[in-house]
Every structure is written in structure tokens, then in C-alpha cells.
């Protein structure tokens, strides 16, 4: 499922690739299901498929308030598609707010600064940082080797630069007893971002539709 609805927003699941294998991620524990939506992609949707899908869903009579890039994968793995989709959504519905949910490693993934691209394409950026401790960031996010050394600093700098660029930016943390949450909030403020505390998804019981039969071979995180 590429498009899904959640809390009044239209969500886009454009990739299953991730630079991290976050310890708190539910995608494999819930067999790639999220509240009854199957977010395992048999193939990454093409740019054309996504643009067509937006045109079908963002007519003037639809009531979506927000378009959110958030699925079981890191959206900046497909920055070109993300930007094209965001701009097209704004063309179709100038009133809609566009948000990127990210682990904050897009610059390292793309090998360049992506903040200027995001500015003008999205309104809000939500960066999953989860800790103020660089060592704990490694254990929580379990990044691929190429992101271990620079990942935490890159995610923080990305959040700061998004905020400085005028994007409404928040740093998020999963509510865990082993994290110094006031320190994460202080970090967010120091970066010029808002702070948002997220419940652990298991605590919400949101996996009730997860299928009993586990599939294999697509754990790409
Ligand atoms: S970035 Fe982390 S939380 Fe998001 S889908 Fe990938 S592994 Fe899961």
C-alpha cells in the first residue's frame, strides 16, 4: 500500500528502504502491517504512479488537511520522488500542509544538502532523534555502518537547519524509560525545533491487524 489515510491525513509510503534498523520500529514485529494497512511494497512505486495517485486522491472535494511522507521506510531514500510528489500535491491542493517524517539522515543518504530542496516543497519536518546521547543514538537506531560515525550529529544539524530555513520542525522521541526525555526536549529547543513525545506503538495496541504468517526476505532496514 503506497497511499493510506491516518488521522485525517493522506500518508505516502514511497519506499521500504532505511539507513537504520531502529530498535523501536514495529515494521517487522507487525509483519509490515500498520493498523490493517499492508505497507510492504512489492516494488517501489514509480514517480508516475505516485503523481497519478495524488491526482486521484487530492481533488477539490477531498478533506485531507495534510500530506505526510511516512511509511515503513525512510522517504529521503527517494528524495527526487518525494520532492516531485510534494510539489504536485501543492499544485493540486495549495491549502494542504505537507510533512516529512524522517530519521534525519537525508544529507548523508543523498551526499549533499537537501534542506534547500525541502524548503518550498514541504511545510513541516519531523525528525526522529529519540535521544540526546550520541552513544544511545547508535543503540536505538542501529544505523548502517556508513552512518554510524556521523549519523547523530547529522540528524541534529539537519533539524537545526530545517528550522533555520523556516520549516516548522520538530524533534521527536519515543517515550521510553531508558531515555532522558528532558534532555531530548532541551536538545530540540537548542536546535530551534519543537519537541514531540511519541508513545511506543506497542503501547497503543495498534498492531491488532498484523497477520499471523510472517513473510521473509524484505527486511531492508
Ligand atoms: S527509519 Fe527506523 S522507524 Fe522508520 S521504518 Fe526505518 S527502521 Fe523503522
Image (cartoon, rainbow, N blue to C red):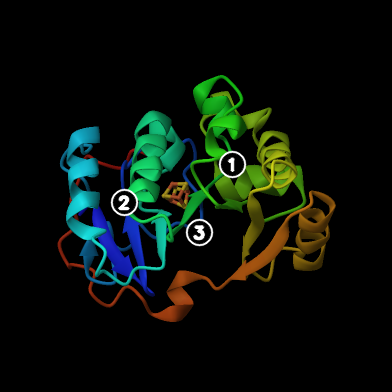
Name the residue carrying label 3.
Answer: 24
Kindly identify the residue that appears in the image at 41 percent across and 56 percent down: 68
Kindly identify the residue that appears in the image at 33 percent across and 43 percent down: 88
**Alpha-carbon span between mark 2 and mark 3:** 35 Å
Dot 2 or dot 3: first in sequence order is: 3
The residue carrying mark 3 has its beta carbon less than 8 Å from ligand 1: yes
Residue 146 at x, y percent in the picture: 56, 23
| 97 shown above or below 145 | below
Residue 147 at x, y percent in the picture: 58, 29
The one of 195 and 19 positioned closer to us in this rendering: 195
The circle on residue 104 is 1
Dot 1 or dot 2: first in sequence order is: 2
- Which image quadrant for residue 52? top left
**Alpha-carbon span between mark 3 and mark 1:** 16 Å
| 107 shown above or below 41 | above
The circle on residue 92 is 2
Dot 3 or dot 1: first in sequence order is: 3
Within 10 Å of disc 2 (Cα), the crowding (few <14, some 14-19, many 20+) is some
User: Dot 2: what SS?
Assistant: helix
Which image quarter is the N terminus in? bottom left
Is residue 28 at least partly visible in the picture?
A: no
Kindly identify the residue that appears in the image at 45 percent across and 56 percent down: 25
The one of 181 and 9 positioned closer to us in this rendering: 9
Kindly identify the residue that appears in the image at 63 percent across and 61 percent down: 173
Amino acid at each position: 500500500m503506497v497511499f493510506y489515510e491516518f488521522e485525517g491525513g493522506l500518508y505516502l509510503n514511497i519506499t521500504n528502504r532505511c539507513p537504520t534498523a531502529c530498535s523501536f520500529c514495529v515494521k517487522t514485529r507487525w509483519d509490515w502491517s500498520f493498523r490493517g494497512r499492508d505497507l510492504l511494497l512489492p516494488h517501489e512505486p514509480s514517480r508516475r504512479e505516485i503523481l497519478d495517485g495524488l491526482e486521484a486522491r487530492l481533488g477539490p472535494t477531498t478533506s485531507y488537511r495534510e500530506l505526510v511522507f511516512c511509511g515503513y521506510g525512510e522517504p529521503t531514500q527517494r528524495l527526487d520522488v518525494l520532492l516531485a510528489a510534494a510539489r504536485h500535491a501543492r499544485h493540486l491542493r495549495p491549502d494542504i500542509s505537507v510533512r516529512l517524517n524522517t530519521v534525519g539522515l537525508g544529507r548523508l543518504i543523498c551526499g549533499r544538502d537537501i534542506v534547500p530542496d525541502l524548503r518550498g516543497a514541504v511545510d513541516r519536518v519531523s525528525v526522529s532523534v529519540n535521544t540526546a546521547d550520541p552513544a544511545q543514538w547508535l543503540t536505538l537506531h542501529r544505523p548502517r555502518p556508513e552512518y554510524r560515525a556521523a549519523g547523530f550529529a547529522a540528524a541534529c544539524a539537519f533539524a537545526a537547519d530545517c528550522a533555520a530555513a523556516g520549516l516548522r520542525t520538530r524533534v521527536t522521541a519515543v517515550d521510553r524509560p531508558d531515555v532522558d526525555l528532558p534532555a531530548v526536549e532541551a536538545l530540540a529547543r537548542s536546535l530551534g525545533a519543537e519537541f514531540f513525545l511519541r508513545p511506543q506503538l506497542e503501547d497503543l495496541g495498534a498492531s491488532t491487524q498484523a497477520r499471523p504468517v510472517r513473510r521473509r526476505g524484505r527486511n531492508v532496514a
